[in-house]
Image: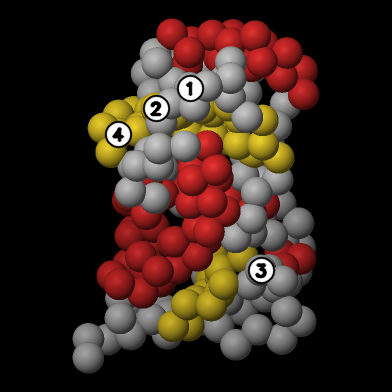
Amino acid sequence: MPPSPSARLLHDWLNTRLGDVSTLRSGPPEVNRLALALDPADLPPTLDADAVFLHRSHRLGDLVPHLSVLTSHDGFDAALTTGENWALARTLGWHDVTPLTSQSASGLLATAPQHDWPGLLAALEARLGGLDEVVAPAAFQPRLALVNAMRPELLDELAAKGAGVLVTGQLRRSALPRARELGLGVVALGHRRSELWGLRQLAGELQEAFPELACTVYGEA
């Protein structure tokens, strides 16, 4: 088995994947065990790890003082939640996937394999472990947009691009009247739920890249 990655190699791999990774604190030069969490509060009082990956680190304080701490916020959101998340599109079997060309949001346009609204909801719920809120479309069509925002003007843009369903993190009630006027369906996956999916996905990708690295995701309960 190859040796465990160095802290520097781990940083470089994460930065290539996410684009904005920072090392906030240096620990052991070799990383055998990596803890992944969305927030410092998700970490247990006693942590058996050599390094920690955090999505949000602003409340780190004096936790894990002797471990390497790596963090990514915007890059993680864009690549692994409701932005340009190619991994989620592959997992859900979406096809005809293209990046959303918009100055106001990050995301993907894709076609789902399901042929009706209940089927789409069931597929999303099975992969994400639940859904927060849904608004049924006037008439279902499988072309959808995975987007990290929900504003009336963005809904106009998505409808013009042929999307009939918006998949996002949180439902914005101020944009609901326009969604209904356009006949769009809306699926709010849940902000934290989509982040946890991304964290599990990242742990799986790391495990594949470094088979000798033990990855543990915290905060799922």
How far apart marks 3 and 2 lie (CA) works out to 31 Å
Q: Label 4's element? A: strand
In the displayed orientation, state which residue is furthest to the bottom: 1
For marks 1 and 2 on the same chain, the one whose residue lies earlier in the sequence: 2
Q: Is residue 151 above or below residue 30?
A: above
199 on left or right of 17:
right
Sequence-earlier tag: 4 or 1:
4
The tag earlier along the polypeptide, 4 or 2, is: 4
**Does the residue at mark 1 contact the one at mark 2 (Cβ under 8 Å)?**
yes
Q: Is residue 157 visible?
A: yes
Helix, strand or loop status at disc 2? strand
Q: CA distance from mark 4 to mark 3?
A: 29 Å
Please tell me whether residue 110 is drawn above or below residue 218 in the rendered image. Answer: above
At a point 22% along the width and 86% down the height, the residue shown is 2
Q: Residue at x 30, y 29 (%)?
A: 98
Q: CA distance from mark 4 to mark 2?
A: 10 Å
The amino acid type found where label 1 is placed reads Gly
Q: Of circles 4 and 2, which is in front? A: 2
Above or below for 187 versus 122:
above
The residue that label 2 is drawn on is 143
- For residue 220, which numbered disc appears in the image? 3
Displayed quadrant of residue 163: top left
Q: Earlier in the sequence, mark 3 or mark 2?
A: 2
What is the distance, in whole Å, between disc 3 and disc 1 at their CAs? 31 Å
Q: Are marks 3 and 1 in contact (CB under 8 Å)?
A: no
Name the kind of residue labelled 4 in the image.
Val
Identify the image quadrant of residue 53: bottom right
